[in-house]
Image (cartoon, rainbow, N blue to C red):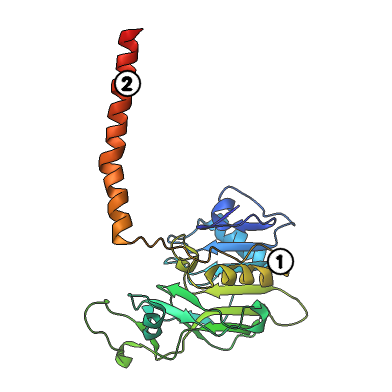
Amino acid sequence: MSVGPLELSVEGIWGAWSILARATLGTATAVLLIAAPDATYPPHVSDLIARFAAEGGSLLWLLGEASATPPGLDLGVEVLPGHIVDAAAARYGLDRPDNAIVTDYPELLAMPADAYSVLPQARGLRTRPSADWRIVGRLQSSPRSWNETGELRGRIARNPELDERAGPLDIVLALQKTGAGRQRLVLVGGSQFVANDHVGQGDNLALAVGLLRWLSDDAQLGPTRVADDLDIDWSPRLAAVLAMGLMGVLPALYLATGLWLRYRRRRA
């Protein structure tokens, strides 16, 4: 199935857009993925999500513009205004500051010791005590980050009067239901880290699969490797040769082929 922009062939994992015309999710559903909703779900979909959660289902909620938390659940989590900017992004060759850098992971994700993830345009999360849920793992931006509420133009600086808080800031929270149950939920402050143009950055794919593994309690779930190098670097000479080939040699070959075919037909 398609999990947002990230393709995963996993039994029992559903995206919320797949349930718009469904009355139930079925007992085989291991994880329900809510992939950055930008509009409010219809009432029957919200009810279905709430019922799935109430029955102990695991959820992976990627924050969108429409809804901050799953319906019917008091997680004790609030979303900070603005988006996270992180000065540590420059260290990893990123031009835009709105790329939150994560280098420290909880043990439940089993990430490599030198792993790092890039979460573009992420929202910061603020927690308060909850009687129903406890935090068992968190991912945070670097200490050089804050939640910027203004436009990213010119020189930017943190303004505490606008509720811009100094990092590290929570970006991903892994929560588990209190009591005897094993219900799990992950709240991520954005979805761009698994978009096609970002899933290959750092260890983003390993992070996404690690979250799904923990939620589904399936250590064998999915691949975690991507190509070692997703960039194509051509020298100026090679680029010039390829450009000449595409703009000159290739059209000339087409013309020569056409003239040869015309000549053959006239001789026939």
Tell me if 31 is positioned left or right of 252 in this view.
right
Q: Which residue is farthest front?
A: 267
Quadrant (top left, top right, bottom left, bottom right) of the C terminus: top left
The residue labelled by disc 2 is 260
| Residue 81 visible in the picture | no
Q: Which residue is farthest right?
A: 180
Q: Secondary structure at mark 2?
A: helix
Q: Which residue is farthest top?
A: 268
- Name which residue type carries label 2: Trp
- Name which residue type carries label 1: Glu
| Residue name at image x 21 percent, y 80 percent | 154
Of label 2 and label 1, which has the lower sequence position?
Answer: 1
Where residue 253 is drawn, which disc sits there?
Answer: none
In the displayed structure, would residue 247 be above or below residue 171?
Answer: above
What x and y, as percent, mark residue 236?
Answer: 29, 60
Quote the CA–CA distance across marks 2 and 1: 73 Å
The residue labelled by disc 1 is 55
Whether pointer 2 and pointer 1 mark residues with C-beta atoms closer than 8 Å, the reply is: no
Q: Residues within 10 Å of mark 2 (few under 14, many from 20)?
A: few
In the displayed structure, would residue 74 be above or below residue 240?
Answer: below
